[in-house]
Image (cartoon, rainbow, N blue to C red):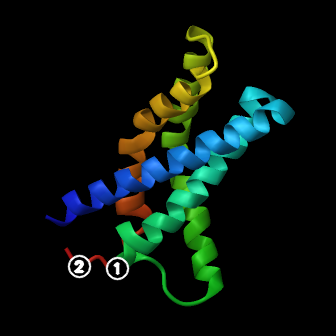
Amino acid sequence: MKIGRELISFAVSGVIGFGVDVVVLYLLAPLLGWYGARVVSFLAAATTTWAFNRRYTFAASASTGSRRSILREYLSYLATMTFGAVLNYGAYVLTLHWVEGRWAAALGVALGSLAGMSANFLSARYLVFRSHRGG
């Protein structure tokens, strides 16, 4: 079933994005603080997942052609991830307020990723990568 394969691939993309998110977060937190670094780390993770999803998850539906269409697709991806990003960041902030310790931020990223995943999958599948959908 196509949607099942896409969901699994989207989850793999999410795991990769989670790794990017946590690494960037912990590298930038000393400079930007936990909240500022989280904004940058989220953008890094979103860019990573867009590239992976474009290449693998929704390859048949990804834009082809000019750089402008690729840029438009990327910006559309970021825009449609907004609802998931709000859920993601909200879970992250709540975790930082309720959990203490060295790995609280990583736990917040994980919980945030889970909170936003469904919204992000549906947005990606039906809004960003909908063209050329065959079934």
Q: Quadrant of the N terminus?
A: bottom left
Where does label 2 land, which residue? 134
Q: Looking at the rendering, which quadrant does residue 104 occupy? A: top right
Of the residues shown, which amino acid type is indicated by label 2? Gly
Decide which of tag 1 and tag 2 comes sooner along the chain: 1
Q: Which mark is residue 60?
A: 1
Label 1 sits on a secondary structure element that is helix
Image quadrant containing the C terminus: bottom left
Residue occupying image coordinates x 53% and y 67%: 51
Q: Which residue sits at x=33%, y=59%? A: 9
Q: Are marks 1 and 2 in contact (CB under 8 Å)?
A: yes
Amino acid identity at mark 1: Ala
Q: Residue at x 60, y 89 (%)?
A: 66
**Where residue 58 sits: x, y (%)?**
37, 70
Residue 32 position by quadrant: top right
Position of 66 with respect to 4 (left or right) is: right
97 vs 70: above or below: above
> Is there any visible trace of residue 131 in the rendered image?
no
Q: Which mark is residue 84?
A: none
Whether residue 73 is visible to the viewer of this picture, yes or no, is yes
Position of 39 with respect to 2 (left or right) is right
Horizontal arrangement in the rendering, residue 40 relative to residue 13 (left or right): right
* Residue 92 placement: quadrant: top right
User: Is residue 50 depicted above or below 55 in this figure?
Assistant: above
